[in-house]
Image: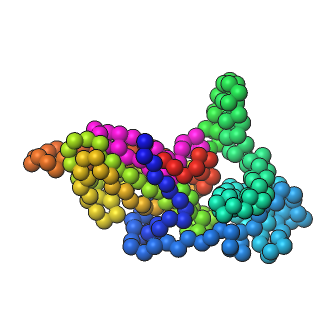
């Protein structure tokens, strides 16, 4: 099975928002290197006097056990640390990656969703299925979207739709309750007939249960024709007012090899928009 990667630092196009869905212009997003930014400090496990403190390099260090309200939420800091660890590992700075990994472990004990995810994974691995069911139900109670992956894969009448979402820290403003998510979609025509994508329909739900339906012509300004055994890919984005949510929907398509063909709907299976990600890497 072929795979495609979705990174927070790809050439995403800057979005123009219409409702909740983000349309895309032709400007590239300049992704900052997390390891070079002055605000990208490591989150320490030991609580300071006020919970926050400045590191040796002038960067902000936030205690996982702080009782005072931090500049960003614990979940946001966890997402930043996760990105920093990946950047350190890719640059082969393994000492730094190990230090960040240890900080992540502290967060996993302090943040209920992360702790329950870890306990659920361990229970399944140990075949303690009664415990796994309990952890699963607790996760559903406190974070309805936490069990949904940040990717999905569905096939309708030979048309396969793969999706991967990522959190974009550089475009988010947690202090203003704005969380920015990008998603990349690959549509593969595994049938023997050419098709054209006519319309899109999204159902977007945030962590508070607020749902919005979005309809539009084509995708990113196009109504692409997809020949048999070929694919079409595009990137777009979605802002939320909560740290997590979900998207699902369908594409209206038509076979273009026969006059008078009736349109049909191709499912986009549900996927998560999550600041925390799902821990499975970035490959679909």
Q: Is residue 170 visible?
A: yes
Toward the right, the furthest residue is: 49
The answer to whether residue 278 of the structure is visible from this angle is no
Q: Residue at x 21, y 48 (%)?
A: 194
Magenta includes 155?
yes
Q: Residue at 53% across / 59% down in the picture? A: 7
Q: Residue 153 colored magenta?
A: yes
Q: Against 30, is 127 above or below?
A: above
Count of marks placed on residues:
0
Whole-percent x, y for residue 200 in the image: 32, 53
- Residue range in magenta is 145-165
Quadrant of the rendering where the N terminus is positioned = top left
In terms of image quadrants, where is residue 114? Answer: top right
Indicate the colouring scheme.
Answer: rainbow
Above or below: residue 49 compared with residue 188? below
Q: Position of residue 76 (x, y in %)?
A: 67, 59
- Identify which residue, 56 or 168, lies in the foreground: 56
Q: Residue at 54% of width from left, 44% of height from top? A: 149
Q: Residue furthest left?
A: 259
Examine the image and state in which quarter residue 174 appears: bottom right
Q: Position of residue 88 (x, y in %)?
A: 69, 62
Q: Nearer the viewer, residue 187 or 180?
A: 187
């Amino acid at each position: 099975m072929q795979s495609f990667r979705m990174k927070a630092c790809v050439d995403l196009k800057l979005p123009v928002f219409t409702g909740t869905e983000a349309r895309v212009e032709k400007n590239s997003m300049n992704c900052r290197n997390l390891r070079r930014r002055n605000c990208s400090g490591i989150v320490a496990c030991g609580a300071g006097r006020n919970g926050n403190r400045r590191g040796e390099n002038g960067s902000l260090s936030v205690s996982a056990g702080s009782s005072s309200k931090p500049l960003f939420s614990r979940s946001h800091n966890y997402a930043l640390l996760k990105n920093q660890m990946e950047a350190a590992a890719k640059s082969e700075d393994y000492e730094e990656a190990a230090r960040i990994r240890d900080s992540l472990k502290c967060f996993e004990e302090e943040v209920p969703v992360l702790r329950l995810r870890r306990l659920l994974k361990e229970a399944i691995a140990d075949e303690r299925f009664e415990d796994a069911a309990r952890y699963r139900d607790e996760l559903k109670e406190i974070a309805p979207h936490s069990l949904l992956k940040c990717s999905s894969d569905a096939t309708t009448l030979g048309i396969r739709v793969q999706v991967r979402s990522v959190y974009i820290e550089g475009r988010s403003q947690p202090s203003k309750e704005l969380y920015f998510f990008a998603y990349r979609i690959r549509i593969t025509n595994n049938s023997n007939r050419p098709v054209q994508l006519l319309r899109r329909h999204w159902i977007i739900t945030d962590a508070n249960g607020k749902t919005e339906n979005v309809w539009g012509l084509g995708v990113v300004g196009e109504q692409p024709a997809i020949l048999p055994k070929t694919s079409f890919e595009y990137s777009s984005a979605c802002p939320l007012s909560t740290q997590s949510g979900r998207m699902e929907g369908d594409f209206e398509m038509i076979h273009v090899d026969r006059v008078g063909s009736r349109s049909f709907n191709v499912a986009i299976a549900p996927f998560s928009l999550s600041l925390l990600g799902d821990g499975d890497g970035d490959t679909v």
